[in-house]
Every structure is written in structure tokens, then in C-alpha cells.
């Protein structure tokens, strides 16, 4: 399979799933959040990822959220759906289920809970690639999911035609260079950790799955486009302004932090589904403080072609 019709470049916010007060999924609010991101010029969407609380959703809810995203995008930007399941067979089932509602590809996490050996991790991706006929983004987030998709594992998947993209949230940008040294541009590289995005672009990232671009989508796209154009002198002041917010993406409670920032920016609700609970008061106060500073000092953005 080729890369399909997806333009694998730019900022793809890892969209939040919105909930009602009883923790049921609020599809109308989720549609509104996604529509506003598309309006503000993001390049793509990732639903049901870590920030989208994938593991707190049933398969039916994941399908419903994906349907909402496809409707909100209206073909203007690609829609990628996260797949995070306990077994390879369940992951393939989920990938095929969201394919039927029109996603452009899936972002596949390692099998959850089980700490697999490298050959088992590779076989998980091979199994889903064989059994789900759509483009796959390999998602590596060892701090959260405990399984590390190393460059060696990724390189071993080079013969899987529909494994087209690699999102790395390890924070180690050297991995992009290691992969490219071995297999050239076989895989499209995506930054997955917000506070190393500029560095990731400098060493070859073509895209960014971003948590905090839910809150500051135009600023995120501007940083990305400036860095891609090697306009680092213009990108750095915006990057430095946003860095305290970007650091929140590296915390274990990143979902609560990002959704609180969304609420403070008037873009969504801070409510998360248990076992994720609201931030303790001290943490909430910290997030409120850095958000207030960011909003009070929002920079003027140079023209990068945003509509």
C-alpha cells in the first residue's frame, strides 16, 4: 500500500474527547472542538489518541468519536484514529472498524499492559498491518506505554508497505537520524512530544502530533511552518513563549493539563473520565498561572500562509 491520499505533514492535534457531567461522551461538544481546530488551520487530526482518552472509551464510543471527526473535517484535512488495544487481534478489529467510517489512517500503539520483547512488539505491528488495509502510523511512547519501539524495531518493519509513518514521543531526537541513516526516507517522521518539536523538525520530522495545539492551534502551526522553512530566528521567540505550556505534554497527567488549558482558553471542557481525576489544587493553580502568563503575552505571528 502507498501512503494513500494523506498529506503526512504539518500539525495534527491529538484531539480531546469531550464528556458530559455524567462522563458520557458529548459528541456535539467534540464536534465543536474539532471544527474549531480545522477552522484555525491545523493540517490534520488525530482522534482517540492518548489525549483523546482512548483507553477509557469503548469500541462503540471510539467509532462514534471518529464519525464525528470525519464529519467535522469534511475532507479538508486527514483524520487519523488512535488504536490502543490489549491484543493484536483486537487492534486489527478496531482499525477495521474505524476504517469503515472513513478515517484516512490509524495511529497504532503497542499492545497495552503486556511488556513485550522487541520481536513481539514488531510482530504486533506486522499483524495489524497484515490484517487492516489502511495506512499505519507507528506510535512510540515508552514513558506512558512502557514498550519502546526502538529504531531497530521500526527498521525491521520497512517491508510492511502500509506502515508509513513513525510518531516518536521518547524525546530522543537522535532516533530520527538513526532511522534515516538506515532506511532513508522510508518512514515519514512525526514529532510526538511537544517540548522537543522544533528540535525534531530540525533533524527531519515532517509532522507533529501535538497536545497543546488543541489550545494554541495557530501558534503551533506557525512554529511548525517556520521551523520547516528554516526560519528559526522567527520561530524561537514563539517557541520560548509557549515552552512552559509545552512542558505539560511530558507529564503523566498530560490529559488533565491539556484539557484544563483548553477550558481556560475557551476551547473545551477540563472534564476527564475516571480513573483520570481533576488536578489537585496546587497543580491546577500552577497550570492556571502559566496559562494566564501565556495568554497575557501572546505574540504576534508572522505570515506562514494560514487561512
Image (cartoon, rainbow, N blue to C red):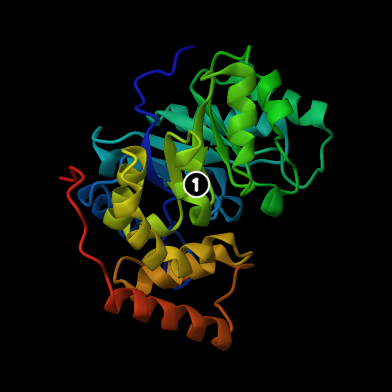
Image x and y of residue 288, in percent: 43, 81
Q: Position of 192 compared to 264: left or right?
A: right
Counting from the top left corner in percent of width and height, residue 129 is at 61, 20
Q: Residues within 10 Å of mark 1 (few under 14, many from 20)?
A: some
Of residues 68 and 166, the one drawn nearer to the viewer in this rendering: 166
Callout 1 secondary element: helix
Q: In this view, does 176 lie to the left or right of 197?
A: right
Q: Residue at label 1?
A: 199
Residue beneath the point at 37% across and 67% down: 241
Counting the numbered discs, the total is 1
Residue drawn where x is 64% and y is 64% of the image: 252
Q: In which quarter of the image is residue 53?
A: bottom right
Q: Residue at position x 41%, y 52% from top?
A: 15
x and y percent of residue 284 in the render? 51, 82
The answer to whether 96 is drawn above or below residue 229 in the figure is above
In depth, the one of 180 and 269 nearer the eye is 180
- Front-lying residue, 124 or 23: 124
Q: Is residue 112 above or below residue 248?
A: above
Q: Where is residue 269 in the image (x, y as percent from the top left)?
A: 39, 70
Place residue 108 in its image quadrant. Answer: top right
Amino acid at each position: 500500500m502507498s501512503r494513500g491520499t494523506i498529506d503526512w505533514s504539518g500539525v495534527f492535534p491529538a484531539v480531546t474527547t469531550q464528556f458530559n457531567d455524567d462522563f458520557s461522551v458529548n459528541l456535539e461538544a467534540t464536534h465543536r472542538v474539532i471544527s474549531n481546530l480545522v477552522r484555525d488551520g491545523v493540517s490534520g487530526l488525530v482522534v482517540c489518541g492518548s489525549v483523546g482518552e482512548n483507553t477509557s472509551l469503548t469500541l462503540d464510543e471510539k467509532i462514534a468519536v471518529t464519525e464525528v471527526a470525519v464529519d467535522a473535517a469534511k475532507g479538508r484535512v486527514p483524520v487519523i484514529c488512535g488504536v490502543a488495544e490489549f491484543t493484536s487481534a483486537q487492534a486489527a478489529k478496531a482499525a477495521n472498524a474505524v476504517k469503515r467510517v472513513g478515517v484516512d489512517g490509524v495511529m497504532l500503539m503497542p499492545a497495552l499492559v503486556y511488556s513485550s520483547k522487541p520481536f513481539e512488539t514488531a510482530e504486533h505491528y506486522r499483524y495489524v498491518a497484515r490484517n487492516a488495509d489502511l495506512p499505519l502510523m507507528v506510535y512510540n511512547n515508552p514513558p506512558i506505554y512502557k514498550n519502546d519501539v526502538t529504531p531497530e524495531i521500526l527498521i525491521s518493519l520497512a517491508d510492511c508497505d502500509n506502515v508509513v509513518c513513525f510518531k516518536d514521543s521518547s524525546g530522543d531526537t537522535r532516533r530520527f537520524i538513526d532511522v534515516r541513516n538506515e532506511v532513508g526516507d522510508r518512514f515519514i517522521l512525526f514529532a510526538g512530544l511537544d517540548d522537543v518539536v522544533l528540535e525534531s523538525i530540525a533533524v527531519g520530522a515532517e509532522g507533529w502530533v501535538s497536545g497543546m495545539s488543541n489550545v494554541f492551534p495557530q501558534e503551533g502551526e506557525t512554529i511548525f511552518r517556520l521551523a520547516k522553512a528554516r526560519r528559526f530566528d522567527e520561530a524561537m521567540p514563539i517557541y520560548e513563549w509557549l515552552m512552559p505550556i509545552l512542558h505539560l505534554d511530558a507529564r503523566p497527567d498530560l490529559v488533565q493539563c491539556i484539557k484544563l488549558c483548553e477550558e481556560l482558553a475557551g476551547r473545551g471542557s477540563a472534564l476527564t473520565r475516571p480513573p483520570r481525576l481533576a488536578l489537585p489544587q496546587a497543580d491546577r493553580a500552577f497550570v492556571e498561572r502559566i496559562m494566564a502568563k501565556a495568554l497575557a503575552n501572546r505574540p504576534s505571528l508572522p505570515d506562514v500562509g494560514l487561512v
